[in-house]
Image: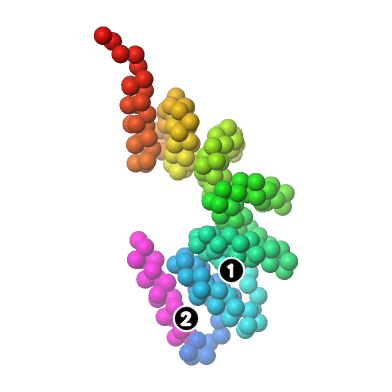
Amino acid sequence: MQNCKSNKIDLALEMWHEMKSKGIKMDVTAYSAIIDGFCKRRDMKSARELFSELLEVGLSPNTGVYTSMICGFRNVNDMEAAIDLHKKMITEGIPCDVKTYTALINGLLRKGDLQSASDLYSKMLSKGITPDINTYTVLINGLCCKRQLEKARKTLEYMNRRRMTARVHIYTALIVGHFKEGNLQESFRLHDEMLDKGLVPDDITCDILINGKFKGISALPRTS
């Protein structure tokens, strides 16, 4: 799958260079596609160069271009650059969408900066931007990593009230979080809830639950 994506990017770059050699002027959409390709490859040097070129030819980057760059910097753990671009978007009046905010929140949570991520989430809501399944996945994973399991549970409940189906990754994060806290009963309850929703546990979830069963057995009183 990764090779397939890489081949598509190579093909797009080949077409890009061919069109430029023929003197065809590129629009923002064309720049956006190539920049996004570099960002997905984590080639932020090339992405930066193309972003600068876009500005030099007199084009204005749109939400998609900025968001691709922010996602790219997040992927290489350069949140300082990602935050700087976000500030630039605000200064230039470029609207941020749910994908922009989700990428920033994800990056901040990866750094362990729960407060800044929470502040940004509140800001997103105040602007009337509705979180999507990706936002909730990022939030719950981050909260579980910081052992904020009660907040993670409330976030899942809110998702359920909105009739949004949680992904396997969300349940895995919650199950692992409760397992680490020694709350095996809640881990198994979440597993049952997961199955009721028609979700298939991944290998990580299965390993955790098998370990939990062995722990439960070893904790039983021995008979003589």
Q: Residues within 10 Å of mark 2 (few under 14, many from 20)?
A: some
User: Toward the viewer: 60 or 111?
Assistant: 111
Identity of the residue drawn at 36% across and 20% down: 219
Quadrant where the image shows the C terminus = top left
Is most of the magenta stretch helix, strand or loop?
helix
What's the coloring here? rainbow
Q: Amino acid at mark 2?
A: Trp
Q: Which residue was labeled with disc 2?
A: 16
Whether residue 215 is situated above or below residue 162 in the rendered picture: above
Left or right position of 134 against 95: left
Of the numbered discs 1 and 2, the one sitting upstream in the chain is 2
Q: Amino acid at mark 1?
A: Val
Extreme residue toward the bottom, this view:
22
Q: Residue 218's spot in the image, x, y percent? A: 33, 22
Q: Which residue was labeled with disc 1?
A: 65
Identity of the residue drawn at 60% across and 78% down: 52
Extreme residue toward the top, this view:
224
Q: Residues within 10 Å of mark 1 (few under 14, many from 20)?
A: some
Residue 143 visible in the picture:
yes
User: Toward the viewer: 20 or 43?
Assistant: 43
Q: What's drawn in magenta, residue-wise?
A: 1-19
Q: Residue 196's spot in the image, x, y percent? A: 43, 31
Q: Residue 32's spot in the image, x, y percent? A: 55, 72
Left or right position of 147 against 13: right
